Image: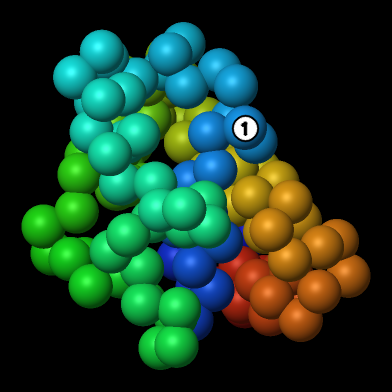
């Protein structure tokens, strides 16, 4: 069974373009939606994402909606803890595909990493 993990130097989740996520208001509180939108740069990437190093500049202080944790996903998406792993993997795969492509190096690295975890 594959195990969810965050792949270093990926950053697909930092592509916040709201046009690609039309249902934000369905899973973010009004306050978090406002915060989310304030983080979107002109290019659609999070203003705190360092694109050269492919990492978050505020990782330890990032908002709750950026934290892939069972309790956050339960609140945002109403999933149970037993559903968390598969749901998180699906979310990552969808985001990586949308940002980098289905056959991208990032997707291949992610699939290999979760299968070896």
x, y percent for residue 43? 53, 57
What residue occupies the far bottom of the structure in this picture?
A: 53
x 65%, y 36%: residue: 20
The residue identified by callout 1 is 19
Q: x, y percentage for residue 4?
A: 52, 57
The reply to whether residue 13 is in sight is: no
Q: Quadrant of the N terminus?
A: bottom right
Q: Could you tell me how many numbered marks the image carries?
A: 1
Rendered location of residue 73, percent (x, y) = 38, 30
Between 75 and 50, the residue placed more toward the observer is 50
**Closer-to-camera residue (7/20):** 20
Horizontal side of 62 relative to 111 (left or right) equals left
Q: Work out whether 75 lies above or below 2.
A: above
* Residue 105 shown left or right of residue 11 in the figure: right
Of all residues, the one furthest to the right in this rendering is: 103
From the viewer's perspective, tell me whether residue 110 is left or right of residue 4. right
**Is residue 60 placed above or below 44 in the rendered structure?**
below
Secondary structure state at the residue bearing disc 1:
helix
Give the residue drawn at x 47%, y 36%: 84
Whether residue 16 is visible: yes
């Amino acid at each position: 069974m594959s195990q969810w993990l965050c792949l270093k130097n990926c950053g697909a989740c930092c592509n916040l373009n709201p046009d690609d996520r039309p249902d934000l208001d369905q899973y973010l509180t009004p306050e978090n939606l406002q915060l989310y939108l304030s983080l979107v740069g002109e290019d659609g990437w999070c203003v705190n994402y360092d694109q050269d190093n492919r990492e978050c500049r505020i990782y330890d202080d990032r908002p709750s909606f950026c934290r892939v944790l069972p309790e956050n996903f339960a609140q945002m998406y109403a999933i149970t803890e037993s559903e968390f792993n598969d749901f998180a993997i699906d979310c990552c795969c969808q985001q990586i595909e949308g940002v980098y492509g289905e056959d991208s190096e990032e997707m291949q690295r992610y699939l290999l990493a979760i299968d070896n975890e």
